[in-house]
Image (cartoon, rainbow, N blue to C red):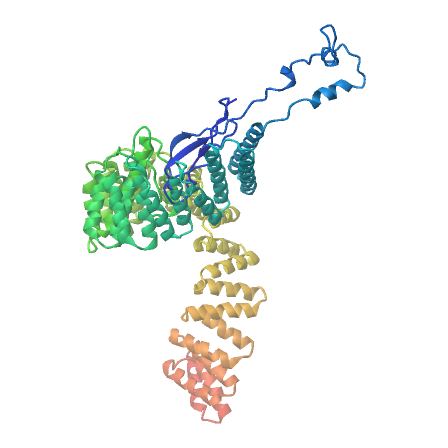
Amino acid sequence: MMSQGITLTNVPDDEKYDSTYDFDSTCVTRGGSRPGSVHPSMSRVGSIPSRGQNSVLLMDRRPMTMQSSMGLSNMRPWTSVGGSDAVSVATMSMSGNTFDPLNATSSHINSVVREKSPREIAGEQELQINKHIDETVLLKSNSKKIEALDKAKEAGKKEQLLRKYKKAHSLPRDNDLALTFATWFNLARAYEANDMMDEAIESYNFLANQRKHPLSRRLRINMGNLYYAKLDYSSAIRQYKIALDQTEKDERSVAHKIRRNIGNAYFKSGYIRDAVKSYEDAMSCAPDFQTGFNLLVCHLALGDLDSTKADFVRIVETPFKSELFDQDSNIFLSDTLCGTQSEMDGVKKCNNLDSYTKDADYFLLNAARLVAPSIDVNDWSAGYDWVRSVLQDRHESLAVQIELEQSTRWLKRKDFKTASKMLRALEKKLGETKAIACTNLSFISFLDGDVDAAAEYAEAALDIDQYNASALVNRGNCHFINKEYESAKECYLEAMGVQGDCAQAIFNLGLTNGMLKLPEEAVRSFEKIHRITPNNPSALYQIADIHDVSDNDEDAIKWFSVLTARVPTDATILARLGYLFSQNDSESQGLHYRMESFRHWPVDLGVIVSIGTWFVTKKMFEKSIFFFQQAALIDPTEIKWGLMVANAQRRIGEHQLGFKVYENLLEKFPESIECLQSISSCAKYLKKPYWKYEEKLERLQSVE
């Protein structure tokens, strides 16, 4: 059975650099069979980091092997030395006519079988090397990287021994270069899989110096990729330039992608103007969407708005089927210069024109999002209008999407009137655009307090798409406001069925369960939100509050403590945590959190009074005076704060100061019976005239 040829493939697609072609280097036996193979997706050469691949098959013949011609199956029977009528022992033994219970003749026959020739031994060793290469590929595909590296090393050792054996026996060595190339390349790929970049570069460098092999020049690209992954951009640029110099004139696609890689490396190094030159050279060779997008990012980083606008127009006018895309080649998409990793992972490999169109839309949309708010600093909306006008003729769907994003930006700026106007215009369109517009209009109406209109828009959005989770949440919110909690709960559950991680639906479901007196279900909903969005303050507060209301102080303290770690300056949360500790015989911790609350919000009268009262109960009257004075400043219409200050001063022996406080209070509150009683008592203690206070006190008491 003929096995698959050794395919030398590219670096993994998730790496941030381009890739080019795959090559198949196969050693062929004399009989035409291929004794060993490497899976096409596992061994690559001459690659540019990409999300796509091209492959060119290159067939190299292995050293020919000799099939055995001396086996027992075709042995000629021996003949006797005597006359023709004599029967040899060998003949009788082979015909089975000799009685030989000790098998004496068979050992004699085996001893005369000819040993294998050096050529045959070399062929068997070559088969073992290819077998090890196959096993390396299979182990890597099964994520057994360490075992794969061991097999690759073993193949390399046997290849070296084979070369020495051939040299010692003067065997033909015409095809040794192909086997050496396949073995060392397999070893380099195994090093790469184990993140041993330096060893992989050393292996590639050895192969690159084998100038006789037609693929050695392509390895400069692989070496550049490794330096790029190591963030050694200067070395990567040097390797890419060597590969570019060795590129043939008819390899325009390869040259284009190498130039783009050089531009990427320059950009990562901070040499943006050099990156611009590389991208412009690539675009002049064969324009494509990604290179144009990278060029736009560079000009935007340099603040050249005119060039940025020109780049955007050039991207829009780029044909979907460029010279780099035909039936025999794929588009290669390397890493772009902006966007998150998750966004980059969304770019799929282009194996046909349809997927290429999707990727083109991806780059166009991101370019529009970058350009629109940057064109006019004083009027951001004008930039969106200009972008929509450029996209309108050739990319109408993208123009509509930019208009939706423009309306959303008006919403973020709380300009509901302008946003509503744009959304009502989009509402007239069909399909998904209308559904999005109706959903946003429902949201705006809900914020304006027009619950009926919000419900109507939500229903209109659901008529278009019944699996619209946002519209279901909006409809549930309308039921919630109308106190139709059961209906609201159904809407939220349906939204969660459509989108399991819909945070708004889960959070609102927790609130609804709370209104339905289902605390356990409410806690489960908020805990799910906590798992989806860890340390979400709103979810943490709701969980702690439910436990507090349910008199589950232990869990309430636990969740409020978690919340204070997330929001350490919220005075209300600190105060509640302090009260909980005080109720659970942890007065020191309770005081600590109330003091922290007072530090962050020193006008909370309840916290101030509770701290002052705590000091009074602990007979620390001197410290309580400060807090009662603060309470009197916050609420000067209440006499009791001043009385508590005076009483505390008397408790520490400052009767004269207390008497002055009573006098000041009596001026503000001349008919206060409590103040008259206190000042009369203090006057007696100080042996001051007190009868006038008692007379006034008797008069007020008689009136009552």
How many badges with numbers are in the image?
A: 0
> Percent from the top left, x then y, of residue 230?
42, 51
Q: Is residue 414 visible?
A: no
Q: In the rendered view, would you say 338 is above or below 173?
A: below
User: Does residue 167 appear to the left or right of 236 in the view shown?
Assistant: right
Determine which quarter of the picture holds residue 97.
top right
User: Does residue 426 appear to the left or right of 661 in the view shown?
Assistant: left
- Name the residue: 45% across, 91% down: 691
- Camera-nearest residue between 57 and 13: 57
Q: In the rendered view, would you say 205 is above or below 606?
A: above
Determine which quarter of the picture holds residue 397.
top left
> Percent from the top left, x then y, of residue 674?
45, 80
> Percent from the top left, x then y, of residue 174?
46, 32
- Camera-nearest residue between 459 and 192: 192
Q: Is residue 97 visible?
A: yes
- Camera-nearest residue between 621 and 497: 497
> Percent from the top left, x then y, of residue 205?
43, 45
User: Does residue 312 appear to the left or right of 504 in the view shown?
Assistant: left
- Quadrant where the C terminus sits is bottom left
- Camera-nearest residue between 508 and 140: 140
**Can you name the residue that lies furthest to the top here?**
85
